[in-house]
Image (cartoon, grey):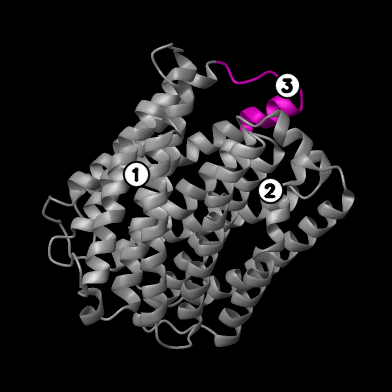
């Protein structure tokens, strides 16, 4: 398997995760101690792109290789070349966004990244074999990635012809919706189900089937939830509500699946904590989307964007996506979380996520209810954001420390 011996791809992914988290930490430092030296917009763009393209995308692709593509095929030049280009463009994005923002150099890098991932995506689809639910989840995850990428090309046309209008922002949300709720959700659950199959965990086929069906039919109409801010038509709210109900039904089937899983798995304490943490976060995400279909919450979310919308995005990328990725990589034995430093790192990481999310939503609700806001909110948020960065760094260092127990 490509990178099997030295785990180069995974270590690069975690390093990019560290850089992205550090950028986020600087952003929160700037809220607490504003400085003209920091370009908020440039730093934000670098933070977000490196987080879901560097850490998220690379780690997912590696997991797909490990679980679904045979070794002989992953050694083909097409995979080696495309991955080398993808890694190079992401590393360059670390600096291009920071130095110049969304300008020519960054646009060129994103274009090269996009074209290269097309080649990679179609090759993966060609090499995927079988009709299991886990494989269907991976395939549809890639389909949704390809759909999301359409927005990146359309954005250039919108900027040239109209500028940053509602159409521009709704195109951005189109990209984010199908990347997050399409690509990441489907591929993450596909990998999780495959790992459970490999561990001989028995899960009802019908439960997995209906989870996939309801999740899938909800994905496209759920995009409406992202554009409710730009329309007053109640029809869109109804469509968004129905889509969120379908997602909630899929969540019910997921709960039944988890009930079967938890009585069978013989994972260690850390793995079980990661699984439960990620599933709670995913459940809250679904509930948040259900609430967002109502006009009242759309209006209040916009008014309190620094709390509710940012809280939601981090609920997905950190509490769900990143935590579940760590679990998947641990179960694949591609990362070690068995040394003391790694375990402490996981503790810092989860603690930082929990309290930053709590602070974001609590402050938002206090302002919504016209109550006294949290004193020194930005300082406290900064401290727990520091926990997240320290945790990721410790997890990375832990990959070079001898484990104290065998990997489970």
**Residue shown at 22% from the left, 65% from the top:** 80
Is residue 124 shown above or below 5?
A: below
CA gap between label 3 and label 2 equals 28 Å
Residue 271, position as x, y percentages in the image: 36, 61
Q: Which residue is mark 1?
A: 347
Picture disc at residue 80: none
Element marked by disc 3: loop
Please state, as top left, top right, bottom left or bottom right, where the C terminus lies in the image: bottom left
Q: Residues within 10 Å of mark 1 (few under 14, many from 20)?
A: some
Q: Is residue 336 visible?
A: no
Disc 3 designates what residue?
Answer: 371
In this image, 215 relative to 45: left or right? right
Evaluate whether residue 178 shows in this view.
yes
> Which stretch appears magenta?
362-375
- Mark 1 → mark 3, Cα distance in angstroms: 32 Å
Quadrant of the snapshot with the N terminus: bottom left
């Amino acid at each position: 398997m490509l990178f099997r011996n030295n785990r180069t791809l995974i270590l690069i992914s975690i390093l990019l995760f560290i850089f992205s988290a550090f950028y986020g930490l600087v952003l929160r430092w700037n809220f607490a101690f504003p400085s003209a030296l920091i370009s908020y917009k440039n730093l934000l763009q670098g933070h977000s792109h490196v987080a879901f393209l560097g850490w998220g995308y690379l780690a997912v692709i590696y997991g797909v290789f490990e679980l679904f593509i045979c070794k002989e095929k992953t050694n083909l030049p097409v995979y080696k070349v495309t991955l080398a280009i993808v890694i190079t463009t992401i590393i360059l994005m670390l600096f291009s966004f920071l130095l110049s923002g969304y300008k020519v150099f960054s646009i060129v890098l994103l274009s090269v990244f996009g074209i290269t991932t097309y080649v990679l995506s179609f090759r993966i689809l060609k090499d995927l074999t079988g009709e299991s639910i886990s494989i269907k989840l991976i395939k549809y995850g890639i389909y949704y990635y390809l759909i999301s990428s359409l927005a990146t090309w359309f954005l250039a046309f919108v900027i040239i012809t109209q500028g940053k209008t509602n159409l521009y922002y709704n195109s951005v949300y189109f990209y984010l919706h199908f990347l997050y709720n399409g690509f990441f959700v489907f591929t993450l659950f596909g990998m999780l189900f495959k790992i459970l199959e490999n561990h001989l965990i028995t899960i009802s086929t019908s439960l997995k089937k209906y989870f996939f069906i309801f999740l899938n039919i909800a994905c496209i109409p759920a995009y409406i939830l992202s554009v409710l801010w730009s329309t007053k038509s109640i029809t869109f709210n109804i469509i968004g509500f129905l889509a969120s109900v379908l997602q909630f039904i899929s969540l019910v089937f997921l709960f039944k699946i988890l009930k079967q899983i938890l009585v069978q798995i013989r994972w260690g304490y850390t793995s079980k904590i990661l699984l439960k943490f990620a599933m709670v976060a995913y459940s809250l995400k679904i509930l948040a989307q259900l609430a967002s279909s109502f006009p009242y919450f759309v209006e209040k979310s916009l008014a309190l964007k620094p709390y509710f919308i940012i809280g939601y995005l981090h609920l997905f990328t950190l509490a769900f996506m990143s935590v579940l990725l760590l679990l998947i990589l641990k179960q694949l034995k591609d990362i070690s979380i068995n040394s003391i430093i790694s375990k402490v790192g996981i503790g810092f990481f989860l603690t930082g996520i929990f309290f930053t999310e709590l602070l974001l939503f609590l402050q938002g609700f206090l302002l919504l209810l016209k109550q006294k806001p949290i004193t020194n909110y930005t300082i406290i948020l900064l401290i727990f954001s520091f926990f997240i960065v320290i945790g990721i760094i410790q997890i990375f260092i832990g990959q070079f420390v001898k484990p104290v127990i065998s990997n489970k």
